[in-house]
Image (cartoon, grey):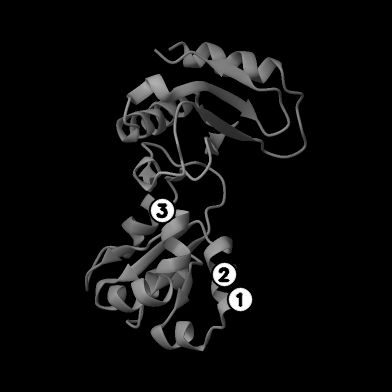
Amino acid sequence: MKIIENLKEAEKNSKKRKFKQTWDLIINLKNIDLNRPENRFNGNVILPNEIGKDIKICIIADSPIKEAKELGVKILSKEDIKKMKKKEMKSLASQYDYFLGEVSLMPFIGKSLGPLLGPRGKMPKPFPPNADIKKLIMLGKKNFNVNVKTPVIQGAVGTEDMKHEEIEENIKTVLDFVTKNLQKGNKQIKNVFIKLTMGKPVKIEVK
């Protein structure tokens, strides 16, 4: 794969904008029957490098978490979740990209939010008492969510101010995860594209 060459080509195909553009990865699948549950999969892929864009993280915990407040991360308690209506829960599941859950609350989270978070590939990462919350939050900022319900996987792998080598590492990590979870590996990948937010897609060769 000549990913760095593809990135340079994509930059040529995109005009400079007044905002920081995101690198979007698009993976199109083929020969996969998504009506069969065994062919559907999802997961949080922790990339080698931060994505650079704002990742919205929510922590569900009853214990006080000072670090989360300092880093501006949303914190919800068990009681907060109990008070939510179905519509509010759906909004929560859509609004946030990455969830962390206090290990003692995971059975409750699974029962109350699991039906909404599970299909989106957003089930919270459980954390024990005295966990390094700051480290877990930083990992969340490297998250790429894979949710195969349709034959298209799409998401941000970085921003235009990052080094090409960092974007390349992130792309390879996502492709490795997807390939390993496909029954026939890369034979079920139709094509892969990379693009900047306002730019034209450039095809990446996958061997």
Callout 2, which amino acid?
Answer: Lys
Which residue corresponds to mark 3? 140
The one of 36 and 106 positioned closer to us in this rendering: 36
Residue pictured at 22% horizontal, 69% vertical = 128
Left or right of 177 in this view: 194:
right
Mark 1 to mark 2 CA distance (whole Å): 5 Å
Q: Are marks 3 and 1 in contact (CB under 8 Å)?
A: no
Mark 3 to mark 2 CA distance (whole Å): 20 Å
Residue pictured at 65% horizontal, 20% vertical = 11
Of labels 3 and 2, earlier in sequence is 2
Which residue corresponds to mark 2? 90
Of labels 3 and 1, earlier in sequence is 1
Answer yes or no: is residue 58 visible. Answer: no
Callout 1, which amino acid?
Answer: Lys
Percent across and percent down for residue 93 are 52, 65
Neighbours of disc 3 within 10 Å: few (<14), some (14-19), many (20+): many
Neighbours of disc 2 within 10 Å: few (<14), some (14-19), many (20+): some
When the figure is inspected, residue 62 is found, relative to residue 166, above or below; the finding is below
The one of 194 and 121 positioned closer to us in this rendering: 121
Which residue corresponds to mark 1? 87
Query: SS at mark 3?
Result: helix
Callout 3, which amino acid?
Answer: Gly
Percent across and percent down for residue 167 are 48, 28
Q: Are marks 1 and 2 in contact (CB under 8 Å)?
A: yes
